[in-house]
Image (tube, rainbow, N blue to C red):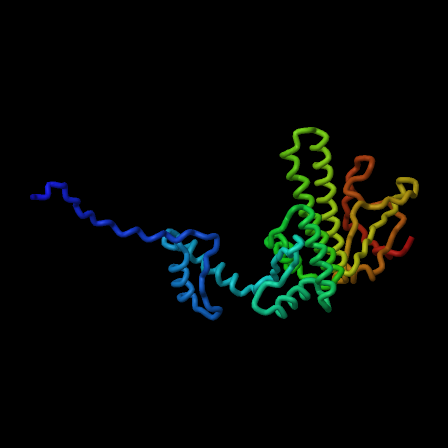
Amino acid sequence: MSDKSPRRKAVAKAAPAPEQPTESGTITIPVHMDASIEELTRKMEQSVPEWRQLAQPDRQQLVDLIIATRKVPEPVQVKLVRREDGSLMIEHVGVSKVLAALKLQATFVAPSMDPVTARMTELRNYMTSVGITDDGRINAALSYIESMEPKTQAEALLLLQSYITHDAAIRAMAQLGNADWMPNVQIYGNLGVKLMRTFQGQMDTLTKMRSGGEQVVRHIYIDNRNGGQTVVADKVTTTSGGGQNARNLEQAHAIGNGPAMLGQDAGGQGMPIASGAREEAVPNAWRR
């Protein structure tokens, strides 16, 4: 008997297409610190997906930014670890815990880890109180403090407070868009404005701490046309920590009782034009 059943045709199955690599938010450019510009350019051509689409000025700018970035030391970083009881604990990041601890001590200008633990606990308590449980926000605060290069623990404390104040101000202002009741708009608006003013005051305090104090000099003139009343000029000169202005303060200034020299007198008459008919001696500045 002949087999009349239809024969199945062999169908060649195509090989599965290779999976495309999933894009991540991180681009790694392995470049040695001592690499030349030519080597750096070749590495970026291999690592940066959009390199061929960039114009030459953009390529040059990218190379310059990579060179500037690799000269900056690694910032201080920590990570949050949740304990079994649900609480969060801050741990060091990096191969060497000693190096990570010393970075934190340098950030807060601390002679030991006790002030570091106190500052990190304060920062963690604030972050968790507003619902922040990711490492990025805490590391952003540390990056801000580190970039300001505090010289004393007092400056480090003030910088930590200013970061928290800024974060609270932004949170208050963000609530304005969600508020649909006018009293809430006023509450959040007033709170945001007060916090931003507080932040400005903290920055002013930091400036005064670093300048070593200020000297304010008021220039006082006496005008007899006002019945001998003292007129205080609006101009105020502020000097900080010496300099040319501070040396000028040591010089004597004569204060006369005569009328003030103006470009035009009160009666509307122009100033008299000096003539060469007779030369007079210049009076002493201290003579009445």
Quarter of the image for the N terminus: give it: top left
> What residue occupies the far left of the structure in this picture?
1
Q: How many marks?
A: 0
The answer to whether 41 appears left or right of 93 in the picture is left
The answer to whether 14 appears left or right of 3 in the picture is right
> What residue occupies the far front of the structure in this picture?
1
Q: Relative to the observer, which residue lies in front, 237 or 155?
A: 155
The answer to whether 62 appears left or right of 265 in the picture is left
**In this rendering, is residue 228 above or below 215?**
above
Identified at 77% across, 62% down, the residue is 242
> What residue occupies the far top of the structure in this picture?
181
Q: Position of residue 173 (x, y in %)?
A: 66, 39
Q: Position of residue 4 (x, y in %)?
A: 10, 41
Quadrant of res 89: bottom right
Quadrant of res 254: bottom right
Identified at 73% across, 35% down, the residue is 187
Q: Where is residue 44 in the image (x, y as percent from the top left)?
A: 41, 60
Q: Position of residue 275 (x, y in %)?
A: 77, 48
Identified at 65% across, 67% down, the residue is 101
Q: Relative to the observer, which residue lies in front, 242 or 26?
A: 26
